[in-house]
Image: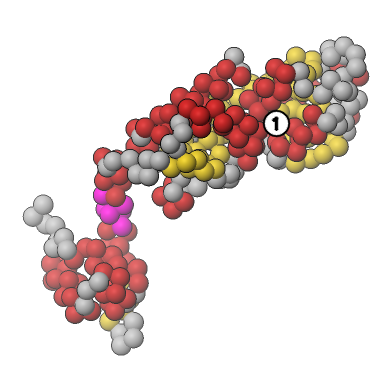
Amino acid sequence: MKNLPPLKSLPVFLTAAKSNSFKAAATQLFVTQAAVSQQIRLLEDHLGCQLFERQSKQTRLNNKGRLLLPFIEQAFNQISQGVKAVAFEPNRNDLRISATHSVTSLLLIPMFTDFQQQNPDLNIQFAPNNKLETFEELDIDIAIRHGLGVYPGLESRKLIEDTIVLVASPLIINSDKRDSEAIFKLPLLEDTSADVQQAITDCCLTFNVNREQLKSKLKTNDSVPIIQNALAGQGLAFISKVLVAQHLTDGNLINVLDYEYQTPLSLYLVAPAQHFTWGKIKSFETWVTSIINEDNG
């Protein structure tokens, strides 16, 4: 602790370094430019070296300053994370959920009335996105992601292991759903995602079908139009079982050939670890775990 510089000088250094201006730093910190200069001078005196190149219209970090900057940034980031880890739950009446477009539209929204009835004081916002956002920048409370569960700096909790099933509407399965020769003559609604492509290859090997003989009517990496077209009787589809579980239960889709493919991917709840201690996240985790396991049980 004895080697630490004057602590008041560190946020001043960080602000001045990012703005490249003592004047701009003073404005941001609501102090005078002379006060900024004084704190920087105290820091430089403590370190025994200059940190800035001082010019008439601009102030820039020199080599020593650029070397110091990432350490100071990391230190303040860690302090911020520590404060959030022990702070009270922010915006406890607002729940902002980020999920992939398919999970949002096919799984969450159709069933969310039940969650809202159980939690009438919560204001719910969906932020559909296929990428994992920065939680701090976009004010996300919880995310649902499809992957391996490895998200650096975040905690992930598995909701369900993924299974790819081969489905079609009863509108086009007029005979035995096990008649593979007839089934593979139907048009394919093809999801180009890597895990689905692996399932297609595996299915062809399982039923001794030439992959080239499958005729794709639609190609996309979006599950929503594929499921919509499958329900309309437009063709076969290899699709994540969790997304069509209710349709299989209701008989809107049939698991043809009883084919299933276990992928290495799963559905995860993802968030900074401290978010899982919040009451609203606990309520959402309990609810979403229940509906997924009920539909896929």
In the image, what residue occupies the spot 33% across and 40% down? 89
- The residue furthest left is 2
User: Residue at point 61% right, 19% down?
Assistant: 295
Residue 208 on image: x %, y %: 83, 18
Could you tell me if residue 238 is visible in this image? yes
> Is 202 placed left or right of 54 in the picture?
right
- Is residue 142 placed above or below 247 in the rendered structure? below
Q: Does the magenta portion include 80? A: no
Q: Is residue 278 above or below residue 67?
A: above
Q: Position of residue 35 (x, y in %)?
A: 18, 75
Q: Which residue is mark 1?
A: 196
Q: Is residue 12 left or right of residue 246?
A: left
Front residue (pair 145, 40): 145
Binning the other alpha carbons within 10 Å of mark 1 as few (below 14), some (14 to 19) or many (20 upward) gives many
Q: Amino acid at mark 1?
A: Val
The picture quadrant where one finds residue 230 is top right
In the picture, the quarter occupied by the C terminus is top right
Q: Position of residue 19 (x, y in %)?
A: 35, 72
Residue 87 figure quarter = top left
Vertical order, 141 against 214 (above or below): below
Part of the protein shown in magenta: 73-79
Task: Identify which residue is drawn at 75% across, 41% down.
Answer: 220
Residue sitting at x 26%, y 69%: 29
Instruction: Residue 58 in the image: state x and y as whole percent.
Output: 34, 82
Left or right of residue 2, residue 159 in this image: right
SS under mark 1: helix
Judge whether 171 appears above or below 229 on screen. Answer: above
Magenta: main secondary structure equals helix
